[in-house]
Amino acid sequence: MSLIEGETLEQRWGTLNKEEREAVCQELNSMAKIWKTLEHPNHDQILYVGGLGNQPLNDIFLSSHPDLAGPFYGADAVQKFQDGCGIEIDGDVPVVFTHDDLVPPNIMLSSGPNPVVAAVIDFGQSGWYPAYWEYCKARRVGLRPQYFDEDSGEEWRTKYLPTILDKVDDETVYHPWLWFVLSHGI
């Protein structure tokens, strides 16, 4: 991070105008769409839910439950993962590559007016997750109050985050995911 010039989105958020915020979010949307297309090296042989290099998932919400970290293989990999987590989400859920920690402190912006995304850092939790996971997690992770008061935090979650990541339905996806996170003391 010290090698990248600029400040985090977290540090800059309060000084950005609406147009700058929208432009940064559009850039992040394009980036997220690109990394979602990254395929697992063995994608033609297996369906996979897990971390980089066939490693267990490194999500903070799974850290106290290594039995849920996988990796999970096979045509029913998503179902195995969801069953382990106790998440009941019906339908075919694609597995996509996710950053898995796409939050303002991990987004570096260029200095000066009209900032652009200089880098997205900290891919330490990245891996192949069900497509809803990145949005749910980014929505749930707390924002530091010295940068986001209650109103600006709510605006980030409800107005800007859905322009970056594909929003999911609260009733059928976010609430079951949130139940998992909260019921496991995470």
Image: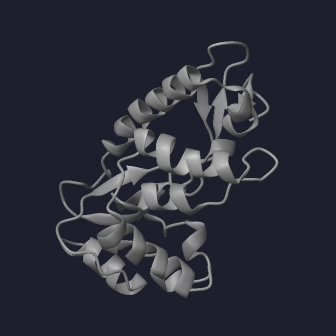
Task: Give the image location of residue 115, x and y in percent.
Answer: 63, 18
Q: Which residue is rendered at x = 72% and y = 33% of the image?
A: 14
Q: Quadrant of residue 72?
A: bottom left
Residue at (49%, 49%) from the top-left corner?
158
Q: Is residue 75 above or below residue 134?
A: below
Can residue 19 be seen by looking at this rendering?
A: yes
Residue 165 appears at what percent x and percent y?
41, 45
- Can residue 102 be seen by looking at this rendering? no
Q: How many marks?
A: 0
Looking at the image, which residue sits at the far top? Answer: 113
53 lies above or below 180: above
* Residue 99 percent location from the top left of the image: 49, 49
Side of 11 where 66 appears, left or right: left
Question: Picture quarter containing residue 109?
Answer: top right
Query: Of residues 47 and 171, which is closer to you in this image?
Result: 171
Identify the residue at image location x=62%, y=85%.
185
